[in-house]
Image (cartoon, rainbow, N blue to C red):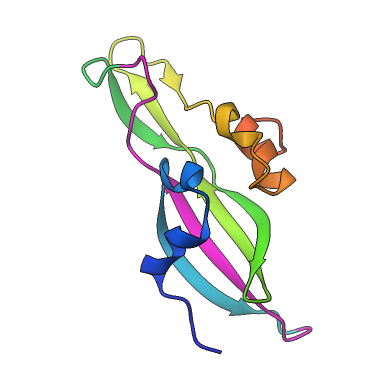
Amino acid sequence: MGTIKLELLPALFPEDITQYFDITGFIQLCLISNKSEYYVIDFVEKNILPNGFSQEEYEAKDFMEPAFIQDFPIIGRGVFLSVKKRRWRHKETRKTITRDFSFIADSSKFTSELSDFLKGTSEYAT
């Protein structure tokens, strides 16, 4: 079976995710133990401040540790998402903020693991 093209991947995911995250990488791997193939897809949060915060006051700081989340299979192969959420820092107080994704996390389009991560209730939440 052929490989999946990186530029086509956004069409496979809900718009709620691709609105806030860029797909920056894609790799097809194989487990030697059972010769099963799976995909790892890298998502990085876009540098778009949450509503109510100003570019004059906040700057992109860094990313949180990526979460490795199992998602629905694609073409019969396992799928794991490596998801990096962004942090912004207030230029004066140095306080950091992150986007609250709970407004999209309850969607039935997501696996429970991805939904929990977006809501901040999973083991990956900080």
Can you see residue 31? Answer: yes
- Residue at 70% across / 49% down in the picture? 111
User: In the image, is residue 96 above or below residue 10?
Assistant: above
Which image quadrant is residue 34 in?
bottom right
Question: Residue 121: x and y, percent?
Answer: 70, 31
On screen, residue 5 versus residue 106, left or right, reads left
The image shows a total of numbered marks equal to: 0
- Residue at 45% across / 21% down in the picture? 97
User: In the image, is residue 83 above or below residue 41?
Assistant: above
Tell whether position 42 is magenta.
Answer: yes
User: In the image, is residue 91 above or below residue 22?
Assistant: above
Foreground pick, 69 / 73: 73
Question: Residue 90: x and y, percent?
Answer: 33, 16
User: In the image, is residue 110 above or below residue 24?
Assistant: above
Can you see residue 125? Answer: no
Question: Residue 66: x and y, percent?
Answer: 54, 47
Question: Residue 10: x and y, percent?
Answer: 44, 58
Which image quadrant is residue 48 in?
top left
Tell whether position 126 is magenta.
Answer: no
Which quadrant, please, contains the N terminus? bottom right
First to last magenta residue range: 33-53
Outermost residue toward the top in this view: 93
Outermost residue toward the right in this view: 34
